[in-house]
């Protein structure tokens, strides 16, 4: 399976693959007496489902009577899962489950009917990491006189580490002085005041 798909091809995805309708039909056939009741909502879901990938996030919408739309920024994404059952694998499909830190154990957004699911997952992961990395490590210009930070450490991290080490050193000195003053009182004995 081809996983490397360029960004423009992923941004152009706006509808699920035709194989999703086949999957919906097969899933409705599991209970033949209920087929006429189940197939109609699935038909509306398939024909109204739309995706939109942008530079800021993803949106998914579907429904006729009860229109539902989910808009999710890349910065909110916490976890991405791929899930497919036997029939979906046979059809070459998978569901991409996108989770956020909303407190719910279920996925916030489920992208269905995508043949290029691995490439979309990788795209979402890169976008998610890119947003978080940019927020954690903003680009800062260093003065020429400042020595370069150690490999793998950012200037912000080094400054925070130095401040923490200074605080720990001060606390250790205070503890040592307190112990020395206490041991000096104890060395004179209980009768000396």
Image (cartoon, rainbow, N blue to C red):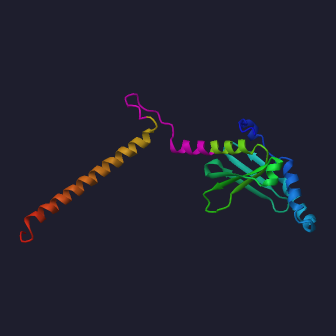
Q: Is residue 139 magenta?
A: yes
The residue lying toward the viewer, choosing from 170 and 59, is: 170
Tally the numbered discs: 0
User: Where's residue 163, x and y in %?
Assistant: 35, 46
Extreme-left residue of the structure? 192
User: Where's residue 72, x and y in %?
Assistant: 68, 52
The residue lying toward the viewer, choosing from 130 and 181, is: 181
Above or below for 141 versus 109: above
User: Where's residue 64, x and y in %?
Assistant: 85, 59
Above or below for 115 versus 147: below
Identified at 28% across, 50% down, the residue is 169
Dominant secondary structure of the residues highlighted in magenta in the image: loop
Location of residue 135 by image quarter: top right
Quarter occupied by the C terminus: bottom left
User: Where's residue 9, x and y in %?
Assistant: 76, 37
Identified at 93% across, 68% down, the residue is 33
Extreme-top residue of the structure? 144
The answer to whether residue 156 is visible is yes
Q: Is residue 107 magenta?
A: no
Left or right: 166 as drawn, with respect to 27:
left
Quarter occupied by the N terminus: top right
Range drawn in magenta: 128-150
The answer to whether residue 47 is visible is no
Extreme-bottom residue of the structure? 191
Identified at 31% across, 51% down, the residue is 168
Above or below for 180 versus 126: below
Identified at 83% across, 48% down, the residue is 91
């Amino acid at each position: 399976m081809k996983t490397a798909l360029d960004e423009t091809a992923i941004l152009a995805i706006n509808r699920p693959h035709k194989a999703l309708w086949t999957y919906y039909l097969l899933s409705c056939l599991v209970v033949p007496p209920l087929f006429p009741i189940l197939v109609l909502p699935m038909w509306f879901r398939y024909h109204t489902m739309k995706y939109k990938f942008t530079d800021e996030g993803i949106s998914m919408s579907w429904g006729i009577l009860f229109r539902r739309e989910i808009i999710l920024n890349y910065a909110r994404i916490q976890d991405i899962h791929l899930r497919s059952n036997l029939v979906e694998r046979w059809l070459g499909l998978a569901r991409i489950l996108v989770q956020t830190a909303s407190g719910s154990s279920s996925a916030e957004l489920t992208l269905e009917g995508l043949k290029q699911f691995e490439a979309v997952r990788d795209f979402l992961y890169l976008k998610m990491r890119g947003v978080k990395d940019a927020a954690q490590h903003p680009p800062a210009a260093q003065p020429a006189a400042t020595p370069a930070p150690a490999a793998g450490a950012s200037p912000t991290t080094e400054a925070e580490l130095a401040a923490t080490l200074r605080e720990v050193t001060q606390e250790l000195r205070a503890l040592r002085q307190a112990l020395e003053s206490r041991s000096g009182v104890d060395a004179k004995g209980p009768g000396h005041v």
